[in-house]
Amino acid sequence: MNHAQLIERGLEWVGTTLKYPFDPDLPVLFVGSKMFALLGRSGAHESINLKADPEEAWLLRQQYSGSVLPGYHMNKKHWNTVVLDGVVPDQEVLDMMEQSYRLTWVKLTKREREQLK
């Protein structure tokens, strides 16, 4: 799994856009006005920051120690950094990204959700 594949998948979901609000080398996927995936690097590997349910975030960090970390430069309780080093199965990464999208979608205002549909 790499950034290009994750961006391609994310852009399939309703209301998703790709922006570069922080740096031209730091793509971010937004749903409406809120970001749900920040794509970066962790050492030699690409990585992705994803929103997660706090309890599940902790479990994923235990299960994939060293490859799922507390969110870099994010709220450590609600965000994980997933290192794309092949340790976390591709489908698991996609599931985490979809969960991040869904958690962010429900935080949009009703009006914004309606406008995106």
Image: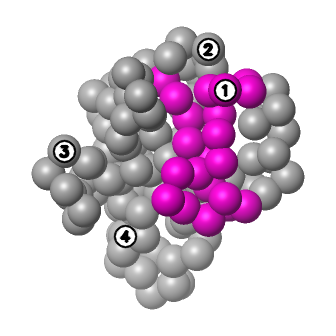
Up the image or down, 91 lies above or below 75; here it is above
Span colored in magenta? 64-84
User: Of the residues tagged 4 and 3, which is closer to the observer?
Assistant: 3
Amino acid beneath label 2 = Val
- Identify the residue under disc 4: 32
Residue 54's place in the image compared with 93, above or below, is below
Q: Please tell me whether mark 3 sits on a helix, a strand or a loop.
A: loop
Report the disc number at residue 25.
3
- Which comes sooner in the sequence, label 4 or label 3? 3
Please, what is the three-letter code of the amino acid marked with disc 1?
Gly
Q: Residues within 10 Å of mark 1 (few under 14, many from 20)?
A: few
Q: Marks 4 and 1: in contact by CB < 8 Å?
A: no
- Disc nearer the start of the sequence (3/1): 3
> Which of the marked residues, 4 or 2, is nearer the chain's N terminus?
4
Q: Which residue is mark 2?
A: 87
Q: Residue at x 53, y 84 (%)?
A: 110
Q: Is residue 34 magenta?
A: no
Q: CA distance from mark 1 to mark 2?
A: 9 Å
**Disc 1 vs disc 4: which is toward the camera?**
1
Cα separation between marks 4 and 3: 21 Å
The percent position of residue 68, horizontal first and vertical second, equals 65, 34
- Tell me if label 4 and label 3 are in contact, CB under 8 Å: no
Q: Which element is circle 1 on?
A: loop
Q: Secondary structure at mark 4?
A: loop
The image position of residue 42, as x and y in percent, is: 44, 33
Q: Main secondary structure of the magenta part?
A: loop
Outermost residue on the left side: it is 24
- Asked if residue 71 lies in the magenta stretch, the reply is yes
Instruction: Give yes or no for contact between labels 1 and 2 (Cβ–Cβ under 8 Å).
Output: yes
Residue that badge 1 annotates: 66
The amino acid sitting under disc 4 is Gly
